[in-house]
Image (spheres, grey):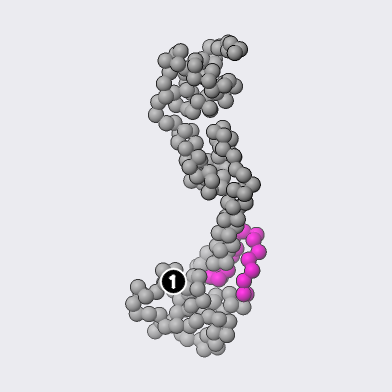
Amino acid sequence: MKKTDWTDRMLAVLVELYPVETTAYTAAVLNLSESTVKLKARELGLVKMAKSRWMERADYIRNHFQECSFSEIGKALGITRMSVGRIAAAIGLKRSSEEKHLISSRIRTQMVKRERRRIVFGLEPITGIRVISNRAKVRVRSNMKSNGYIISEEHNVIYYTGTTERRERLESRGIRLGLHILPLPQDSSALPSNIILQQPCSTDR
């Protein structure tokens, strides 16, 4: 084994990093093997201390690497996706093509659902994804919402209350498109959990 010539600067880096960072990270900074770093640390009596922020981030990335995107992990940790990628590479994490596909498919599905909800409630899209939907039904739902009806977020059910100004033609059009126009139940526990119990306002964003 080739002997490593430890300089004062290398020793200073070792003393600074080894107790608080992973051995892999310290070895990468010094451009040495982990075994060489461990051996020198043992000679100097260096021991690991409490986890540093880098190690905490590395642990989080390791635990969420298989199911979360770099952007999602970065948002949770308060760092950029590029930083997530660098830390993942430093601790030897890699994804297969199948794992990448599953994560991207999940994210796209979530984005499509979010965009559909925004369209249903008359909000502007926030991505460039083209969302296929029944535009006529979307318009009717949006018109009913603006006229005081209560909209179910994911189901084709629309409620009216005793104070709702009923629009017969609008309701008829909605029924033809597959919407169900029902009176709002007196018992709120009978409502689906995704019902938006609020009157529409002109400040929707």
In the rendering, at what x and y percent does residue 67 appear?
53, 49
Q: Residue furthest bottom?
A: 168
- Residue 57 visible at all: no
Q: Is residue 192 left or right of residue 92?
A: left
- Establish if 10 lies above or below 194: above
- The residue that appears at 45% across and 76% down in the rendered structure is 150
- Establish if 60 lies above or below 193: above
In the rendering, at what x and y percent does residue 34 appear?
54, 23
- The residue that appears at 49% across and 16% down in the rendered structure is 39
Crowd class of label 1 (few under 14; some 14 to 19; many from 20; radius 10 Å): some
Segment colored magenta: 119-135
- Establish if 158 lies above or below 153: below
Q: Is residue 119 left or right of residue 59?
A: right
Total count of labels:
1
| Prevalent SS, magenta region | loop
In the rendering, at what x and y percent does residue 12 appear?
50, 16
Which one is in front, 93 or 135?
93
- The residue that appears at 38% across and 80% down in the rendered structure is 185
Q: Quadrant of the N terminus?
A: top right
- Residue 199 visible at all: yes
Residue 122 falls within the magenta-colored stretch:
yes
Which one is in front, 2 or 6?
2
In the rendering, at what x and y percent does residue 116 appear?
57, 67
Q: Amino acid at mark 1?
A: Ile
- The residue that appears at 59% across and 22% down in the rendered structure is 31
Residue 185 falls within the magenta-colored stretch:
no
**Callout 1: helix, strand or loop?**
loop
- Establish if 64 lies above or below 160: above
Residue where numbered disc 1 is placed:
195
Tell me which corner region of the image, top left, top right, bottom left or bottom right, holds residue 138: bottom right
Q: Residue furthest front?
A: 1
Which one is in front, 28 or 174?
28
